[in-house]
Image (tube, rainbow, N blue to C red):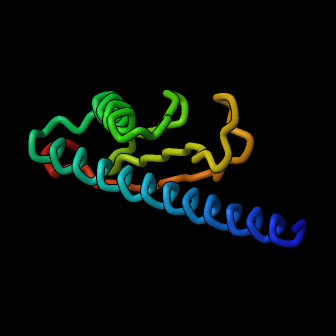
Amino acid sequence: MARIFGWMVFVAEILVGTYAAGMALWSHSQLTNAIENTIEEGTRGGRLSPRALKETLLRKATELGVRLEENSVVIEDGQQTLDIHISWLSPVLTIAARDWLVIPMTIDKSVERPAGRR
């Protein structure tokens, strides 16, 4: 009986780990798409300022269910590029509203400014 219980726990751990990895990949993919869409909209509208980009990304991340804090989104304004760095923790194991095991995730992207905005 103990052997069967042990295998059941093992299978449950594998399923939870697979689910958590899938959710982490999903959040990374969705946030990458949000960055691309925001940059495309900003480039088309000519308003690709770091502050507006950061606010839009924070709003979109919240809509997607990705928990980002304001200091986890860093946008550096260069002469010809905007450098975007986003980092967050994707929870694997949450008990009583506390994350006990997390996967650290990051996205780094450099975007050229439109020719008229340099």
Residue nearer the viewer, 22 or 41: 22
Whether residue 54 sits left or right of residue 96 in the image: it is left
- Which residue sits furthest left? 45
Q: Quadrant of residue 77?
A: top left
Q: Give the residue drawn at x 76%, y 62%.
A: 9
Using the image, determine if residue 9 lies above or below residue 68.
below
Residue 91 placed where, x, y %?
A: 61, 45
Q: Is residue 84 left or right of residue 55?
A: right
Residue under the point 64% across and 29% down: 97
Q: Is residue 39 left or right of residue 85?
A: left
Nearer the observer, 25 or 98: 98
Q: Position of residue 46 (x, y in %)?
A: 12, 39
x and y, in percent, of residue 48 in the image: 23, 39
Q: Quadrant of the C terminus?
A: top left
Q: Give the residue drawn at x 16%, y 51%.
A: 115
The residue depicted at 64 percent of the width and 53 percent of the height is 103
Indicate the position of residue 112 as horizontal and vertical percent values: 28, 55
The quarter of the picture where residue 3 lies is: bottom right
The quadrant the N terminus occupies is bottom right
Residue at the right extreme of this rendering: 2
Q: Nearer the viewer, residue 56 or 14?
A: 14
Looking at the rendered structure, the number of numbered marks drawn on it comes to: 0
